[in-house]
Amino acid sequence: MPYVTAGRENSAAIQIYYEDHGSGPPVVLVHGYAQNGHSWEKQETALLAAGHRVITYDRRGCGASSRPSTGYDFDTLAGDLEVLLTRLDLRAVVLAGFALGTGEVARYLAVHGPARVTAAALIAPLLPFLLQTPDNPGGLDRSVFDALTARITADRPAAMKDFLDRSYNIDLLGGSRVSDQAWQNSFYVALTASAHAAAGGVTASREDFRADLPRITIPVLIIHGDQDRVLPYPATRSRLPALLTNTRSTVIAGGPHAIIWTHADEVNQALLDFIDHPGPARGQQNGRAG
């Protein structure tokens, strides 16, 4: 199993598990909260068929990677991504993140720059800033994050069930866009994430990316479902064009948070179209997929 070493905690190395498949222009996929690199399986299949090299990895605390007690802030997570890109000596990369993974993408580009990356995709983005503050009145009250952290601490399996039900809009899409077995697989994967990663992801989701985004000058694709109950469209995607200078956007009608599974065909088409023709696109280009 391939790993890169991203640091140490006491006597143990912190190892990041990755998979590297195919050949051609590289695409690196950064997974969402409490999942792993395999959550991208529908995108990986489409990208490989289109002639791309596809690299997925498990965030620290998730999947087959090490489970340290620290390092779940986005500066550290972006540093883990930099270790991977440097170790594999990847160039001209398209960097795609889903949900929490969009935080890694944005922080990586703001801190480490675009030398290795030619374009980025933000799917169901966390950005730009979720926490309510005096200069961000449309954000979520801190009590929402505190309650979720308390719920994870008290009963992590129950908290993960609630999260996945909202991710898939299971009351609307269960049995049609998502099978019981697919939901159960996501639940199992979520439970394998460490308790530190589960709580740390909630804390990290409060980070402010408003200063990071104007530093991103490469072409950026934004894909979002208009029925996202986890990272609602009005609080996230709708605010990004004012902070990014080179964007295009696809809004998936009826799409929940977990659109990389429930609406994989629409996501894959938008992603492949963008990779083939990334820009330059000044301003926002809107599209809808049903």
Image (cartoon, helix red, strand yellow):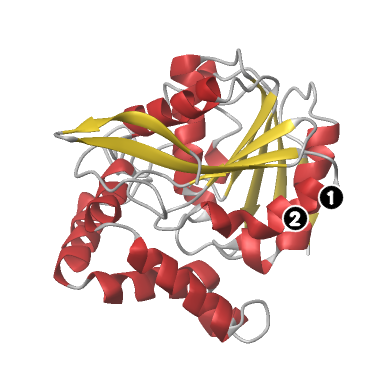
- Between 268 and 236, the one lying in front of the other is 268
Q: Residue at x 23, y 43 (%)?
A: 68
Q: Residue at x 51, y 23 (%)?
A: 87
x and y, in percent, of residue 119 in the image? 68, 27
Tell me if I can see residue 253 in this picture.
Answer: no
SS of the residue under disc 1: helix
Graded by Cα atoms within 10 Å as few (under 14), some (14 to 19) or many (20 or more), the crowding at tag 2 reads: few
For the residues bearing labels 1 and 2, Cβ distance under 8 angstroms? yes
Q: Is residue 82 left or right of residue 95?
A: left
Tell me the tag on residue 285: none
- Between 11 and 97, the one lying in front of the other is 11
Which residue type carries mark 2?
Thr
x and y, in percent, of residue 202 in the image? 29, 51
Q: Residue at x 41, y 44 (%)?
A: 59
Graded by Cα atoms within 10 Å as few (under 14), some (14 to 19) or many (20 or more), the crowding at tag 1 reads: few
x and y, in percent, of residue 219 in the image? 70, 25
Q: Is residue 17 left or right of residue 255?
A: left
- Between 235 and 184, the one lying in front of the other is 184
Say which quarter of the image contains residue 22: top right
x and y, in percent, of residue 126 in the image? 46, 45
Which residue type carries mark 1?
Ala
Say which quarter of the image contains residue 168: bottom right
Q: Is residue 18 left or right of residue 14?
A: right
Tell me if I can see residue 249 in this picture.
Answer: yes
- Between 182 and 19, the one lying in front of the other is 19
SS of the residue under disc 2: helix
**Residue tagged 1:** 49
Give the farthest residue toward the front: 1
**Residue tagged 2:** 45
- Cα separation between marks 1 and 2: 6 Å
> In the rendered view, would you say 95 is above or below 41?
above
- How many numbered badges does the structure rendering display? 2
